[in-house]
Image: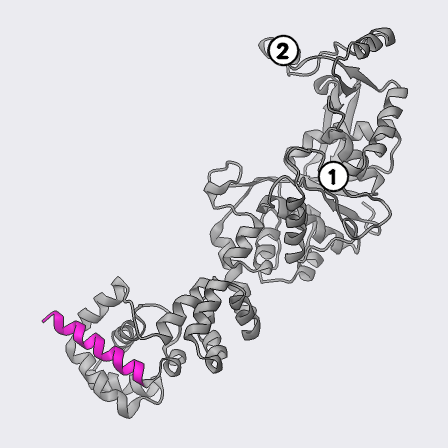
């Protein structure tokens, strides 16, 4: 691979919203292009007229831009190789179909789906791999014309010599060898006149000067077909290929919603931050020596094709949440506040419960206990409202601690309420409690939980009046046990 002229591409079909598997492919192509100061191309493979929709085109572009995976060539960025929608390239494809026909490297096929189904069934029964039997390959020009005149529908097949061998070096999986006899003549133009994936994908890569194709291993067996097409058309230089492992669920099956997989839009709407998704996906099927949170530029500087994995990459929600937490911890208070206010339900609660002048202190206080925006909603209610909902653990802790402790704490507060350190020291001395036996009941009474932000940080946000009210409420709960 000439590292001085690397050009990668992402070529999705706009038939639905982007999922993590698709985005990871885009990410690896983007990072490798950046790694070698090359170009990242976006192309829309929209030849499926029934399923392709403009709304999905717009959505996938929005998703890529939200993740900062900006393309240097493609829609809105003409690099002189467009159009970048395959539906607009029919004239280009026709030129190359005609060239293959003229060189007798392709031929029309009039076999019906029923005939092909019976042929495949017979081959499987005989223990042979299913491939096209070549029925229409030997039709004479007159026979072909007669079938056209009769209005019979036809596809266009690429002729694969039985005795040919296709060998290429995959950048992830090493040398690959395929025999023409095992592949058979394959369709390059459908009966409705649209180009098959094998054909338009290969032709566009060549014409758009893509030098490195990084894609899922499910496309590995497409590669010999595409190389044959490119060589027959004299389109050079040939791109290099790197077929990466697929993303699977915990059970090894293709990733789906039952494994917790979401679209990029769903992840964004639920509050995941773009850098968290990027850091997770960059390590899903690729090994980085640096396990710290990294920027896109840092990830690009350290990506290596040799570190791409062959074995399936298992989706792990815990790991995604880990990187979300890392991004939250690294963000500034202003960045976190902007993130939280970008989610309407959270924005409503923060603006309703948290005084404007206390918002920066609030963010700083809950940062370590926040992964998703809704976490901030919870703590806004806990700290700033008068209605405290106790968790089961907190209620048990309060009742276990007993009446005397909260009586003493409530009496101590007025003269020792300047800060939590002073108050807890005085309470510990009075009640003869320390460590967990001191701090856990105080946390349970003041926050309704047994885990959460540092009490010292929450102290001033809670305020002496609310603290007193909650200590008295805890005291009343212990009396119910008596």
Quarter holding the C terminus? bottom left
Q: Is 88 positioned to the left or the right of 373 in the image?
A: right
Mark 2 residue crowding within 10 angstroms, few (<14) / some (14–19) / many (20+): some
Residue 475 among magenta residues? yes
Instruction: Point out residue 338 in the picture as x, y percentages from the top left corner.
Output: 56, 70
**CA–CA distance in space, label 2 to label 1:** 31 Å
Query: How many marks are shown on the rendered structure?
Result: 2
- The quadrant in which residue 460 appears is bottom left
Is residue 293 depicted above or below 112 in this figure? below
Residue that sits furthest to the bottom in the current view: 415
Closest to the camera, between mark 2 and mark 1, is 2
Q: In terms of secondary structure, what is the magenta stretch mainly?
A: helix
Residue nearest the observer in this picture, 154 or 42: 154
Q: Give the SS element for disc 1.
A: strand
Tell me where residue 212 sits by quadrant: top right
Which percent across, then down, holds residue 219? 67, 33
What segment carries the magenta color? 465-482
Q: Left or right? Give the position of 409 relative to 17.
A: left
Q: Is residue 353 above or below residue 375?
A: below
Q: Position of residue 14 (x, y in %)?
A: 66, 41
Left or right relative to 411: residue 255: right
Query: Is 221 on the left-hand or right-hand side of 275?
Result: right
Q: Which mark is residue 44?
A: none
Was residue 454 drawn as part of the magenta stretch in this picture? no
Residue assigned mark 1: 241
Q: Which residue is mark 2?
A: 123
Q: Earlier in the sequence, mark 2 or mark 1?
A: 2
Q: Are marks 2 and 1 in contact (CB under 8 Å)?
A: no
SS class of the residue under badge 2?
helix
Residue 292, position as x, y percentages in the image: 58, 62
Q: Residue at x 55, y 47 (%)?
A: 263
């Amino acid at each position: 691979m000439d590292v001085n002229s690397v050009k990668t591409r992402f070529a999705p079909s706009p038939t639905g919203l982007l999922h993590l598997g698709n985005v990871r492919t885009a990410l690896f192509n983007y990072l490798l292009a950046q790694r070698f100061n090359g170009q990242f191309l976006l192309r829309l493979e929209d030849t499926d007229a029934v399923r392709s929709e403009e709304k999905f085109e717009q959505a996938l572009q929005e998703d890529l831009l939200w993740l900062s995976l900006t393309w240097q060539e493609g829609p809105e960025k003409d690099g002189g190789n467009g159009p970048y929608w395959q539906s607009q390239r029919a004239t280009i494809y026709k030129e190359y179909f005609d060239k293959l026909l003229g060189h007798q490297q392709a031929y029309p096929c009039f076999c019906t789906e029923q005939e092909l189904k019976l042929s495949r069934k017979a081959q499987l029964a005989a223990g042979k791999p299913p491939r096209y039997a070549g029925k229409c390959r030997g039709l004479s020009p007159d026979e072909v014309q007669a079938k056209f005149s009769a209005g019979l529908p036809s596809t266009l097949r690429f002729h694969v010599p039985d005795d040919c061998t296709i060998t290429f070096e995959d950048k992830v999986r090493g040398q690959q060898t395929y025999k023409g006899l095992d592949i058979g003549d394959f369709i390059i133009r459908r009966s409705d006149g649209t180009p098959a994936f094998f054909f338009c994908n290969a032709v566009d890569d060549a014409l758009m000067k893509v030098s490195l194709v990084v894609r899922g291993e499910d496309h590995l067996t497409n590669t010999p077909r595409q190389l044959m097409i490119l060589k027959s058309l004299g389109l050079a230089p040939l791109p290099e290929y790197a077929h990466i492992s697929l993303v699977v669920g915990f059970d090894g099956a293709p990733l789906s919603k039952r494994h917790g997989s979401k679209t990029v839009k769903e992840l964004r709407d639920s509050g995941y931050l773009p850098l968290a998704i990027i850091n997770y996906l960059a390590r899903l099927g690729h090994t980085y020596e640096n396990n710290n949170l990294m920027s896109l530029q840092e990830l690009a500087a350290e990506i290596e094709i040799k570190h791409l994995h062959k074995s399936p990459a298992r989706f792990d929600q815990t790991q995604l949440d880990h990187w979300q937490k890392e991004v939250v911890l690294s963000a500034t208070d202003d960045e976190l506040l902007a993130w939280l206010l970008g989610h309407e339900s959270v924005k409503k609660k923060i603006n309703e419960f948290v005084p404007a002048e206390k918002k920066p202190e609030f963010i700083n206080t809950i940062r370590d206990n926040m992964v998703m925006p809704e976490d901030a909603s919870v703590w806004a209610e806990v700290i700033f409202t008068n209605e405290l909902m106790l968790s089961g653990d907190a209620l048990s802790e309060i009742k276990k601690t007993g009446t005397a402790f909260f009586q003493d704490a409530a009496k101590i507060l007025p003269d020792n309420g300047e800060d939590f350190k002073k108050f807890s020291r005085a309470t510990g001395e009075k009640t003869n409690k320390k460590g967990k036996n001191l701090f856990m009941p105080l946390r349970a009474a003041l926050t309704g939980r047994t885990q959460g932000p540092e009490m010292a940080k929450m102290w001033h946000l809670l305020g002496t009046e609310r603290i007193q009210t909650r200590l008295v409420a805890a005291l009343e709960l212990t009396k119910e046990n008596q």
